[in-house]
Amino acid sequence: MFLKELNQSITTLKGIGERTAEAYAKLGIRTWSDLLTHLPRSYEDRTVTRPFAKGYDGSPVLTVMDVVAHEQIRYRKGFALKVIVKDDTGPAALLCYGRNFLKSTLEVGRRLYFYGQGKLQYGELQFSAFETAPWEEGVPPPAEFSRILPVYPLTEGLTQRRLRRDIAALLRSSARHLSEELPQDIRSRHDLMGITQAVKRIHFPPDLKAIERARHTLVFGEFFYLNLLIRRRALKRKEERRKTVTYPRGLYERLKHALPFPLTEGQQRTLGEILEDLEGDTPAARLIQGDVGSGKTLTALLSAVVLIEAGRQAAFMVPTELLARQHAEEAARLLEPLGINTALLHGGLKPSERKLLVKALSSGDIDLLIGTHALFSRDVSFRDLGLVIIDEQHRFGVLQRVALSRKGSTPDMLYMTATPIPRTLTMTVFGDLDVSTIDTMPPGRKPVITHLASEQSRMRVYQAVRRELERGRQAYFVYPRIGQGVEEALKDATSMYRYLTEEVYPGMPAGLVHSKVPQDEQERTMAAFKKGSILYLVATSVVEVGVHVPHATCMVIEHAERFGLSALHQLRGRVGRGSDQAYAFFIYSRELTDQGKQRLKVMKETTDGFRIAEEDLKIRGPGDISGTRQSGFIQLTFGDLVRDLKVLHTTRKEADRIIDEDPGLLSPSYSICREVLERSADFTEELFDG
Ligand code: ADP
Ligand code: MG
């Protein structure tokens, strides 16, 4: 569903004003497409009548009832309306707290359709939330009392009724923009609906069976196009021939010898594979996996040097500005002495500075450019971009990868990730990439010792950290929130910064870092922390990726149960980067579930990122729909990489078969596939330029 027409704002829909749009935005819904893909969390089957007599156990009642009498009951300082009703099977009471206006709707003697969930109280079946509609002889019941209704995830300011109405209206007005996006032969072979029909039915299914089939169709469609895209990209890359070159290795060798340590075996092997790629006769795309601290950044910089010596340019893209600055410093420190020009492109540049930088880049004066995805904005162009390095690749969507390579002729691509990716996924989702793994750690690293602590023993943790601080070591304190939110009980970085500096460690220099702190201040704080003039850093998970401070030996994470295992692993990887023994303290809240305990125990038992990732998948199990979706491997709308693994494999086979048969997708029966792929590529570019 990458249709441009669906990309327009929901405010173009009738009846959606600014207030409603704001409420929708809280759910991440801004465009037509967002709204159409806001899937029901469950359904209410209102096709089967269930009378009052069957509602005593709390199951929903759907019936036709008569209003018998009105009564008054005490409520707050006044009275509330209580309406006595009955159907064929018996009586019930409707409590209308604060809704005295129901008096006229529920007039004595009226017959109405009724839906609600009640409970047995004071010997009668009571309802306080319910829906009604007038009943009329010979007139069919309205939809809300005769169909299967979707139940959507909601937020303040939105109601189920509102969502049902808006989505139904959108389905009517957008139907002509949806096209049947799966080739006919695939639809019949796998018993699929059309995409348009599937979208309609996932929201408003005629019967319960239709829901599964619609969902299957949507997941199939999503995975099928994903596989087709990946497969075709791999093929195109392999088809593109270029002249092989042999690069000089002078600077490369000099940098290697200037390092105070030898490269690890894993780094050497990976570098060998990359250098072979660079000199090869097809453009390269390689995924470098390696646990936190395994030395990926250095490996990437060494690769870049090879190209740069030959007069070409490299770009290094990272997910946050903080990391960009840090990498830029590291790159300057290592490369400038070799006569290589490095530069940082960041949001804080004045227009005039940016202009200068862009010019130096297009004239080739800058050899290595480092920055966030801003590197690929429209005004940035290179003289001869030969290599694109993407750090922490899991932070960027799979589809977004497409747009990146368009800046040079066809640069070689290096994707680096510290998030271990299970083999099944590298085979499919990353199927267009070659993979190298840095499986050795630099020598002398001691594994981080992990302690789990309950909230009550917090003070003991603070004490233990104090001992480290007093010995000149440094610490991180990480919190799930920036500031005080609705959840009062949840500690946040801002108030804990105050508490720690005033009550726990008075007199010890500290810093506060989160995404709302201005960039230049974040930068100053990080620099001071690195230098050691700040002893501890209070932060959110902004410090999760790449931050490198060798003297930091303590990582304290409060409300650890709020973080994903991958995030905990990354955060823990921030310490133990020097030669001192390092510690991680995961403080958990009192209401920790059994599953939560099990998760944290895994973190205590192992520091192996691959095991953690796999345990995470196992514990979460295939039932958890949001799991892999949020894991950041890939942004999916319908499918789930664990639950729908079978579909992923099936669609991969289909995609392979089609590409083998018809690589250009030229036959008329696949023209629809070609169209969808072209549209999704456009869409990706827009994402990046916007
Ligand atoms: P990653 O990006 O894989 O998490 P980094 O590239 O940030 O890891 O490396 C972490 C630290 O280890 C850096 O200070 C780096 O200089 C150092 N390092 C890299 N390779 C080696 C090595 N072979 N021996 C010792 N230290 C190394
Ligand atoms: Mg790194």
Image: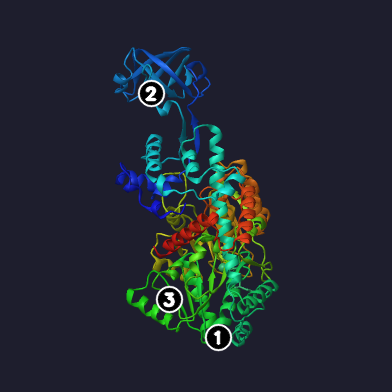
Amino acid type assigned to the residue bearing label 1 in the image:
Ala
How far separated are the C-alphas under marks 3 and 1?
19 Å
Amino acid type assigned to the residue bearing label 2 in the image:
Thr
Q: Position of residue 580 (x, y in %)?
A: 63, 68
Question: Is residue 572 shown above or below 263?
Answer: above
Q: Quadrant of residue 416?
A: bottom right
Q: Looking at mark 1, is its residue's CB closer than 8 Å to ligand 1?
A: no
**Mark carried by residue 381:** 3
Label whose residue precedes the other's in the sequence (3 or 1): 1
In this view, the residue farthest toward the right is: 265
**Which residue is disc 2 drawn over?**
132
681 with respect to 156 (left or right): right
Q: Position of residue 3 (x, y in %)?
A: 43, 53
Q: Secondary structure at mark 2?
A: strand
Name which residue lies at 30% across and 44% down.
Answer: 17
Amino acid type assigned to the residue bearing label 3 in the image:
Ser
Label whose residue precedes the other's in the sequence (2 or 3): 2
Whether tag 1 and tag 2 are in contact, CB under 8 A, the answer is: no
**Mark carried by residue 310:** 1
Name which residue lies at 62% across and 41% down.
Answer: 594
The local crowd at label 3, few if under 14, some if 14 to 19, many if 20 or more residues have their Cα within 10 Å, is some
Name which residue lies at 56% across and 34% down.
Answer: 209
Q: Is residue 454 visible?
A: no
**Mark carried by residue 601:** none
Name which residue lies at 44% across and 69% down.
Answer: 376
